[in-house]
Image: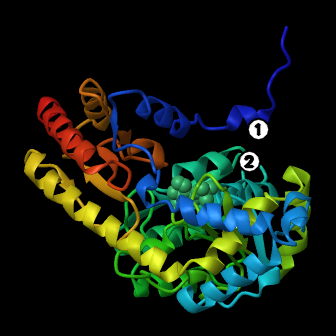
């Protein structure tokens, strides 16, 4: 007889993200499915130089030692300055906690704030990885429908009437849809949430990847009880696992204790390498290269979609991030399209798992990862598969 898993393990959602990454990495496969940044945009020379600088300086031994549980202070200071300048968010470095990627923030926030049955308002659709983290803590989800420009205010009001503990949202180039909130929506969300007794959790994973700059001011800058999560994964390297959350002052001691209980601290070596990378590279120029490259990839991707998709299929033109949101005609089955595409060696991510309700006719397409030749092959497969099932 084996020991039974905990109730928490039982309430975890199935992970399809890692499964997709493994299917997509099989030889001959093309993938529009995952959320990986374009590896050609990594800067291995810059990272090597930064790592070598750290290891040949007085910082070498401290960088290999345990460090401050909340993270390397010079990096927290740089994040604080950048958030103030770029996102309009005034947050002291002492309120910024470095984590092992921003994914860890959702687990920590779940641990800190959610008991089974607590309300959690989320975008519908929303980021699957966060839903997986939160699900372990057994929340009752209220889905707030989201479209280009922002969430349904009526939906948000209805969700808030159930007194949730948190509202989790991605106002910039959302995963999975690529949608961004307009200025009015940001202000509208802030007005509804501020003072309501709940925590706003604003995920800014794609905030630096607006094709023409930042989509808007952080909503957290207009709300007292808000957490903003961010990451170097999409713009420097996901392998280094450096993310952060900017917390209200009252939440820092508990978050620090929770982080210590989970992992003692996030990796100090990676934090110092990123910190040095930001010093030796012109970070704005680095981001500008990425934005331009992703804009060119997106334009090409959308052009090929127009050439290959049969009538009745719709999609958006996102202003940044990595994703395009495909909508089949109402009632069409996106799972059938994914299977038909897989038979043609194209891996797709159905939109349904990102939803708390509906979404059976949607698919998330990543235009950032595939190379130009993979995009052409993948689009042919997508067009044939769509014609087969529609
Ligand atoms: C919206 C969003 N938030 C957070 C993450 C987590 O990324 P990381 O843990 O690498 O910072 C991802 C990763 O795909 C994401 O798409």
Q: What residue appears at the point 11 percent right and 46 percent down from the top-left corner?
A: 308
The disc label shown at residue 137, or none: 2
21 vs 302: above or below: above
Q: Residue at x 9, y 44 (%)?
A: 310
Residue 8's disc number: 1
Residue that protrudes farthest toward the top in the picture:
1
Image side of residue 46 versus residue 343, left or right? right
Q: Is residue 116 left or right of residue 123?
A: right
Image x and y of residue 118, in percent: 72, 55
Marks 1,2: beta carbons within 8 A = yes
Q: Quadrant of ligand 1?
A: bottom right
Between residue 317 and residue 275, name the one nearer to us. Answer: 275
Q: Position of residue 323 (x, y in %)?
A: 36, 57
Give x and y (percent) for residue 189: 52, 80
From the viewer's perspective, tell me whether residue 252 is left or right of residue 237: right
The image quadrant of residue 72 is: bottom right
Does residue 228 show up?
no
State the SS at label 2: loop
Q: Is mark 1 within 8 Å of ligand 1?
A: no
Residue at mark 1 to residue at mark 2: CA–CA distance: 6 Å
């Amino acid at each position: 007889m084996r020991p039974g898993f905990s109730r928490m393990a039982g309430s975890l959602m199935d992970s399809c993200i890692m499964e997709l990454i493994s299917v997509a990495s099989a030889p001959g496969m093309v993938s529009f499915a995952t959320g990986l940044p374009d590896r050609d945009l990594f800067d291995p020379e810059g990272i090597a130089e930064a790592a070598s600088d750290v290891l040949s300086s007085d910082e070498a031994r401290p960088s290999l030692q345990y460090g401050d549980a909340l993270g390397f202070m010079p990096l927290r200071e740089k994040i604080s300055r950048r958030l103030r300048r770029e996102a309009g968010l005034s947050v002291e470095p002492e309120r910024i906690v470095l984590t092992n990627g921003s994914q860890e923030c959702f687990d920590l926030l779940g641990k800190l704030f959610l008991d089974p049955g607590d309300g959690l308002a989320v975008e519908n659709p929303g980021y699957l990885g966060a839903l997986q983290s939160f699900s372990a803590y057994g929340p009752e989800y209220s889905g707030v429908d989201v479209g280009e420009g922002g969430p349904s205010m009526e939906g948000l009001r209805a969700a808030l009437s159930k007194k949730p503990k948190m509202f989790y949202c991605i106002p910039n180039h959302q995963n999975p849809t690529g949608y961004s909130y307009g200025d009015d929506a940001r202000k509208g969300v802030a007005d509804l949430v501020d003072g309501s007794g709940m925590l706003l959790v604003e995920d800014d994973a794609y905030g630096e990847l607006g094709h023409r700059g930042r989509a808007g001011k952080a909503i957290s800058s207009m709300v007292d009880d808000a957490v903003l999560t961010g990451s170097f994964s999409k713009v420097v390297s996901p392998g280094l696992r450096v993310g952060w959350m900017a917390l209200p002052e009252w939440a820092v001691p508990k978050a620090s204790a929770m982080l210590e209980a989970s992992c003692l601290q996030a990796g100090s070596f990676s934090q110092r390498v990123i910190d040095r990378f930001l010093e030796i590279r012109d970070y704005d120029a680095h981001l500008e290269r990425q934005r331009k490259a992703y804009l060119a990839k997106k334009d090409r991707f959308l052009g090929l979609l127009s050439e290959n998709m049969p009538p009745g299929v719709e999609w958006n033109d996102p202003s940044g991030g990595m994703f395009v949101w495909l909508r089949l005609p109402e009632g069409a089955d996106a799972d059938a399209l994914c299977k038909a595409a897989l038979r043609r060696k194209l891996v797709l991510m159905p939109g349904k798992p990102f939803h708390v309700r509906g979404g059976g006719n949607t698919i998330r397409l990543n235009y950032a990862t595939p190379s130009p030749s993979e995009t052409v092959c993948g689009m042919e497969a997508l067009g044939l598969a769509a014609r087969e099932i529609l």
